[in-house]
Image (cartoon, grey):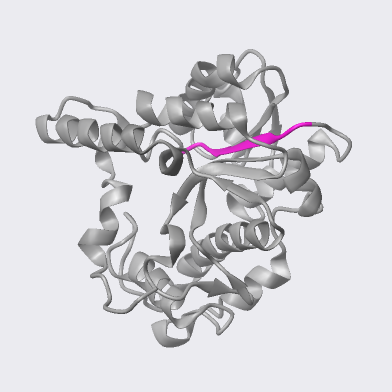
Amino acid sequence: MDVILAAYTLDKARTALAFCDRLRPGLGAGRRIAVLNDPRLRPGVAHAGWEFFDGTNSFGEFSAWQEGLDRLGPDRKGGVLFLNDTVVAHRRFSAFRRWSLLRELGRANPRSVVGFVDHADNDIGDLRICGMVLPGWVSSYLFWLGDETLQRLDHRLWDRAAVDACVRGGADQATFFSEQLSPDLREHLCEWLFRGGWYQSEPLTAANADRFARKARVICAELILSARCWALGCTRQDPFERHPLARALDRRTERLIRTARLSSALWMQHPQHWERRTRHEAPRVGAG
């Protein structure tokens, strides 16, 4: 399969390239494309077997992935694995996570989406975006789209007009997101961005409103992509949903490593993604 990596910083890009090398025996043949959203990376990221080119960074990782997909061309065959350079910098990618991912990639059908799903089955309420139901979304740090999935998406990962319609911006949380998002989804994203969910979270102000609007648009692109895939009848294959023992072992070993400070890797500086809901969002009685 083909691989497209969105790269921003040298250290993270190098760790992501090394991660892909470890995955490569399970991925088979295909092109490896790294889109550099910062052209200053080019002198430091030479890596055998990869094609590098400068991205526009017009829309973060989504513009990088789209530019890489366009470079592959519409006539290519097979699925594509998309990665952000945070793939192993912001989280621990354990042997259990890697095994379950490769297991699902190996059995995926051409109309499927393989990736780790956040908030599966609307477990934080009524989730809808742009008129589409959102039964969880695939986290965009690492995901695979099959050949038929890409065809159904018309080989387009995001639409600027749809994304812009979701985010008004400004310094008022109450109007920051539009009615294109359901109330529960708006509340969840405000919690994530402005009340401690994200590692760069902080209260919304006039000074940081533009930065948060850019981040919110990328998040909405991630949500819309999953919603489109589900609306188009694509199959969701979450490696941890299908292999719950691997998920349990992943979490238990991570707790041990964090508690005993057994690693100095970059991911140790970031909180456990899978524990944030219990920390920042109390379950709601009667929520879907």
Residue 80 drawn in magenta: yes
Say whether residue 73 is left or right of residue 53.
right
Q: Is residue 170 above or below residue 61?
A: below
Say whether residue 77 is left or right of residue 251.
right
Say whether residue 199 is left or right of residue 173.
left
Q: Quadrant of the N terminus?
A: top right
How many marks are shown on the rendered structure? 0
The quarter holding residue 34 reads top right
The residue range painted magenta reads: 78-86
Q: Quadrant of the C terminus?
A: bottom left
- Residue 270 percent location from the top left of the image: 28, 44
Residue 121 drawn in magenta: no
Residue at 67% of width from left, 20% of height from top? Answer: 50
- Residue 6 percent location from the top left of the image: 59, 39
Q: Is residue 165 above or below residue 82?
A: below
The quarter holding residue 96 reads top left
Residue at 77% of width from left, 44% of height from top? Answer: 148
The quarter holding residue 33 reads top right
Q: Residue furthest left?
A: 260
Residue at 46% of width from left, 36% of height from top? Answer: 87
Closest to the observer, 286 or 136: 286
Residue at 52% of width from left, 21% of height from top? Answer: 23
- Residue 173 percent location from the top left of the image: 40, 82
